């Protein structure tokens, strides 16, 4: 009974937040609606006794990612009205369609490959910390180069954004 109530309340918060992201014309309000959606998902993780995922959801997504969104919104000054009918490149819609079909094909191939490999995987140990230890082993030994490269790429992207959007001096 309590689980159903928690699920219903969290589902209402998630759907209301998602609708708020879509209908809010102010990007800051849309980002705050996204926070409500992410907190609702965290509540569902707690209800499923996935406390680690709930903490990651709140810290990484509701904290860091939304702060990054707000940083970009404030930095770019999206309060200006832009004409969306003007296309800088005439080929961009066709190219976006090709890229979209390619990404969809990659996702379908990944899901098909994952389903095939799902039955071939080895069983995890019975202790509760096995997936955290496996995640740490995977990130910090097998994929440490990719992890560090991603962090450097994100830092370069933020610095590039700041340099590209700053006002030029008149002299």
Image (tube, helix red, strand yellow):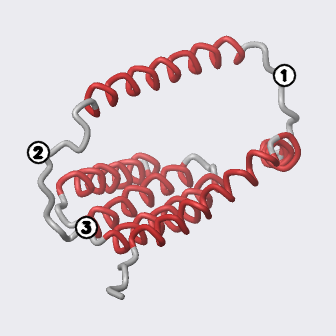
Q: Nearer the viewer, mark 2 or mark 1?
A: 2
Label 1: state its secondary structure. loop
The residue that appears at 83% across and 25% down in the rendered structure is: 123
Which label number is shown at residue 85? 2
Query: What residue did someone put label 3 on?
Result: 78
In contact (CB < 8 Å): disc 2 and disc 3: no
Residue 129, image x and y in percent?
Answer: 82, 48
Q: Earlier in the sequence, mark 2 or mark 3?
A: 3
In contact (CB < 8 Å): disc 2 and disc 1: no
Q: Nearer the viewer, mark 3 or mark 1?
A: 3
Structural distance between the alpha carbons of marks 2 and 1:
53 Å
Number of callouts: 3
Query: 4 or 20: nearer the eye?
Result: 20
Query: Dot 1 surroundings within 10 Å: few (below 14), some, or many (20 or more)?
Result: few
Residue 77, image x and y in percent?
Answer: 28, 72
Q: Earlier in the sequence, mark 2 or mark 1?
A: 2
Query: What residue did someone put label 1 on?
Result: 122
Which label number is shown at residue 169? none
- Quarter containing the C terminus: bottom left
Q: Is residue 79 above or below residue 9?
A: below
The residue that appears at 35% across and 74% down in the rendered structure is: 74
Q: Quadrant of residue 95?
A: top left
Query: Dot 3 surroundings within 10 Å: few (below 14), some, or many (20 or more)?
Result: few
The residue that appears at 14% across and 46% down in the rendered structure is: 86
Query: 4 or 102: nearer the eye?
Result: 102
In contact (CB < 8 Å): disc 3 and disc 1: no
Q: Earlier in the sequence, mark 3 or mark 1?
A: 3
Label 2: state its secondary structure. loop
Taking the image as shown, residue 128 lies to the left or right of residue 95, namely right
Taking the image as shown, residue 38 lies to the left or right of residue 47, namely left
The residue that appears at 86% across and 36% down in the rendered structure is: 126
């Amino acid at each position: 009974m309590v689980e159903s109530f928690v699920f219903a309340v969290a589902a209402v918060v998630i759907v209301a937040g998602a609708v708020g992201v879509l209908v809010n014309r102010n990007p800051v309000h849309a980002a705050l609606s996204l926070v409500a959606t992410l907190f609702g998902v965290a509540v569902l993780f707690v209800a499923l006794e996935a406390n680690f995922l709930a903490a990651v959801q709140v810290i990484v997504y509701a904290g860091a990612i939304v702060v990054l969104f707000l940083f970009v919104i404030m930095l770019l000054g999206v309060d200006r009205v832009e004409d969306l009918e003007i296309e800088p490149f005439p080929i961009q819609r066709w190219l976006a369609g090709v890229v979209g079909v390619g990404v969809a094909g990659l996702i379908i191939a990944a899901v098909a490959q994952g389903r095939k490999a799902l039955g071939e995987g080895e069983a995890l140990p019975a202790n509760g910390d096995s997936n955290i230890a496996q995640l740490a082993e995977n990130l910090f030994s097998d994929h440490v180069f990719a992890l560090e490269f991603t962090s450097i790429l994100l830092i370069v992207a933020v610095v590039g954004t700041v340099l590209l959007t700053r006002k030029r001096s008149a002299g």
